[in-house]
């Protein structure tokens, strides 16, 4: 009996090790496809516009500027009345100031707008840079069965979360091209939804500095898209970007 238990324990450990190695190899492919960990780490400043398209019509995008080293952030949010809303905040402290047409908003509205801007930061950056966030603290990943997508063999990575982010009940499945390491599709089940959504990803493009990401995701059900008409790595940013509306 002791020998049997020892053998079972050994086999379990061996299988776990093989799976861990397989996941590590796939993660390495994912990192290589985006340009490598060091490339992302050196990509300090990001500028991007987050937009949605439905039935051939696009909304006004949210414009983002991000200093990844300091957490300083600038979000320009279009308003239905044509006014310009700018929120300057820090992603680490979640504190900042909101301005409407260059005028500081009253304190009674400021916290609400900063909170809204932070939520946009969480959502919009995730749509853009998911492939570099697989190993973030609080992210749980496991491999599921490979799938054939448009004739391409894809590894399936399932993600869930340990009370991190604003919606920790979300679940994602990323489908990784076995040959290129690019994510070609994702499926997600959000914590307040009952049905999954599936989006195909366009091939990666270089955003500058060697960082490569997909800039359009298209819903298979209705052909609506989330896309980034502007997405680039910047060498420098004017210091006023994060201090003046």
Image (tube, rainbow, N blue to C red):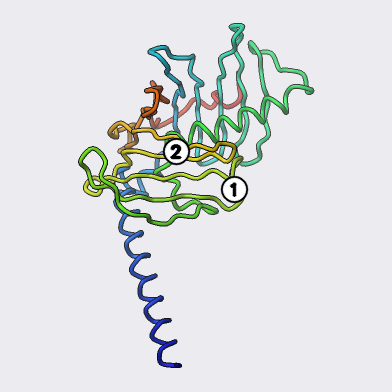
Q: Quadrant of residue 242?
A: top right
Question: Left of 159 or right of it: where is 209?
Answer: left
Q: Nearer the viewer, residue 156 or 5?
A: 5
x, y percent for residue 169: 58, 45
Quadrant (top left, top right, bottom left, bottom right) of the N terminus:
bottom left
Which residue is painted at 42% across and 18% down in the image?
53
Question: Left of 34 or right of it: where is 168?
Answer: right
The numbered mark at residue 46 is none
Q: Residue furthest top?
A: 81
x, y percent for residue 37: 37, 49
Quadrant (top left, top right, bottom left, bottom right) of the C terminus:
top right
Residue density around tag 2, few if under 14, some if 14–19, many if 20 or more, within 10 Å: some
Q: Nearer the viewer, residue 164 or 85?
A: 164
Q: Quadrant of residue 165?
A: top right
Which residue is painted at 45% across and 93% down in the image?
2
Q: Which residue is mark 2?
A: 44
**Which callout, 2 or 1, points at the residue further toward the start of the chain?**
2
Relative to 105, residue 154 above or below: below
Q: Which residue is mark 1?
A: 164
Q: Residue furthest bottom?
A: 2
The residue tagged with tag 1: helix, strand or loop? loop
Which residue is painted at 44% across and 38% down in the image?
44
The residue tagged with tag 2: helix, strand or loop? loop
Which residue is painted at 51% across and 41% down in the image?
69
x, y percent for residue 41: 41, 45
Q: How many marks?
A: 2
Q: Nearer the viewer, residue 35 or 38?
A: 35
């Amino acid at each position: 009996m002791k020998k049997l238990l020892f053998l079972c324990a050994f086999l379990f450990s061996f299988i776990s090790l093989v799976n861990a190695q397989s996941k590590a190899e796939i993660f390495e492919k994912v990192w290589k496809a985006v340009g490598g960990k060091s490339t992302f780490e050196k990509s300090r400043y990001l500028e991007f516009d987050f937009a949605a398209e439905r039935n051939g019509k696009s909304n006004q995008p949210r414009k983002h500027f991000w200093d990844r080293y300091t957490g300083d952030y600038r979000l320009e949010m279009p308003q239905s009345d044509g006014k310009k809303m700018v929120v300057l905040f820090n992603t680490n402290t979640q504190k900042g100031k909101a301005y409407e047409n260059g005028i500081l908003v009253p304190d009674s509205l400021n916290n609400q707008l900063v909170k809204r801007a932070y939520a946009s930061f969480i959502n919009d950056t995730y749509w853009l840079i998911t492939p570099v966030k697989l190993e973030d603290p609080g992210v749980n990943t496991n491999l599921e069965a490979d799938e054939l997508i448009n004739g391409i063999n894809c590894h399936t990575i399932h993600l869930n979360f340990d009370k991190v982010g604003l919606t920790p009940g979300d679940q994602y499945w990323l489908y990784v091209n076995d040959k290129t390491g690019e994510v070609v599709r994702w499926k997600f089940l959000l914590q307040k939804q009952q049905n999954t959504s599936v989006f195909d990803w366009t091939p990666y493009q270089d955003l500058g500095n060697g960082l490569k990401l997909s800039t359009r995701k298209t819903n298979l059900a209705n052909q609506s898209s989330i896309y980034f008409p502007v997405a680039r790595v910047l060498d420098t940013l004017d210091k006023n970007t994060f201090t003046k509306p």
